[in-house]
Amino acid sequence: MSVATAGLGAAPFSAPGEAPTQRQSWLAKLKAGLRKTGASIATVFNGTQIDDALYEDLEAALLMADTGVKATAHLLEDLKRRVKDTRTSDPAQVRELLIDALTQLLTPLQKPLVIGQFKPTVIMVAGVNGAGKTTSIGKLTRHLAASGVSVLLAAADTFRAAAREQLGVWADRNTVDIISQDGGDPAAVSFDAVSAGKARGRDVVLVDTAGRLPTQLHLMEELRKIKRVVQKTGPVQCAGDASSVPDSTPPHEILLVIDGNTGQNALNQVKAFDDALGLTGLIVTKLDGTAKGGVLAAIARERPLPVYFIGVGEQLEDLETFNAREFAQALLS
């Protein structure tokens, strides 16, 4: 995993899992995880000619992979142009052109999570129950702590004891501090954690919020309250020339964790949470074994937020930075 940094030494710096051999192992897992999606698309290119039937079959396969109507139309138009420009006549070569088209569509999502511009960098993490939110926070904490970044966790999911316990386990495992209350007000816990992070000189404060569906309006309002209360902690230190930074008031990142298996539901969650909170990035989990891996293309076309990390398993090394070409190749291999 590579995290871009400012003010914490060389940038970008690497956390465990970034060695070439380990990256190759990760890519193999990603390819295996996306095989179910890729297999349905790959069969389209088994024919002997490029005709309307091929494009119709490809359209159906992309829609079945939850690429979405808008992204599918965009990819088909782009692909037809590439086929014409290259005068390609072999259906097998069309797959390579589709990889190029998908890479170009996904590239705007490929941005690093920057740590160190602010001290502390306050990261608020949201998501529905079961998306892998708390586990993703634990994995991210592990990578940051192993790279010399000091982390403080805020257990703002105060009404679910299991969430506090799970986050506590990650805190113990990674030897980082945690701010927690039994049944306390989530916004108050978040405020205390950010204040403690500033007082203790931590590099990062990670705020875990309660899982909720975007249709649970009272809970979505609670998220907005957490954001407002965190803002009341005031500006934090800035690396370098503070005049070049427009506003250092936290939260600096608002991330949504989505389950890649949920396809168009994941896109709907991105839209709802972004409208409510103003998301700055995404973590996409559970891409292993999914038939709906095309949802990243739908996100790229309809709500192009940075995808900081993607996950294909439960191990620490199974959360990695997103690379557009790697993903396109794994999906269509």
Image (cartoon, rainbow, N blue to C red):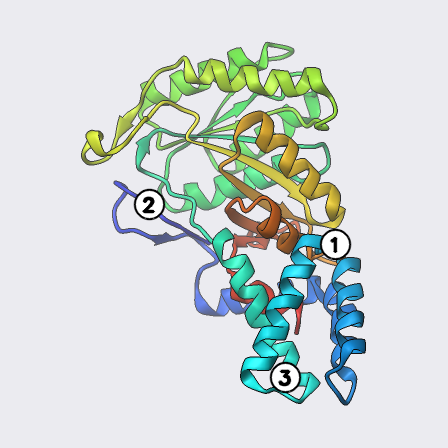
Going by the numbered disc 3, the residue's amino acid type is Gln
Residue at 33 percent across and 45 percent down: it is 5
Q: In the displayed structure, would residue 83 be above or below residue 231?
A: below
Q: In the displayed structure, would residue 189 be above or below residue 29?
A: above
Could you tell me if residue 241 is visible in this image?
yes
Q: Which mark is residue 93?
A: 3
Please name the residue that numbered disc 1 is placed on. 66
Mark 1 is surrounded, within 10 Å at the Cα level, by few (under 14), some (14 to 19) or many (20 or more) other residues, namely: many
Check disc 1 and report its element: helix, strand or loop.
loop
Check disc 2 and report its element: helix, strand or loop.
loop
Residue 78: percent from left, percent from top: 59, 68
- Counting labels gives 3
Q: Quadrant of residue 159?
A: top right
Of the pair 23 and 221, the residue shown nearer to us: 221
Residue 258 lies left or right of residue 17; in this view the side is right
Please name the residue that numbered disc 2 is placed on. 5
Q: In the displayed structure, would residue 100 be above or below residue 112?
A: below
Q: For the residues marked 1 and 3, what is the alpha-carbon distance in whole angstroms?
A: 23 Å
Mark 2 vs mark 1: which is more N-terminal? 2
Residue 203: percent from left, percent from top: 35, 33
Going by the numbered disc 2, the residue's amino acid type is Thr
Going by the numbered disc 1, the residue's amino acid type is Asp
The quadrant in which the C terminus is found is: bottom right
- The answer to the question of whether label 1 and label 3 lie on touching residues, with beta carbons closer than 8 A, is no
Could you tell me if residue 312 is visible in this image?
no
Residue 281: percent from left, percent from top: 51, 41
Residue 187 lies left or right of residue 15; in this view the side is right
Q: For the residues marked 2 and 3, what is the alpha-carbon distance in whole angstroms?
A: 39 Å
Of the pair 205 and 87, the residue shown nearer to us: 87
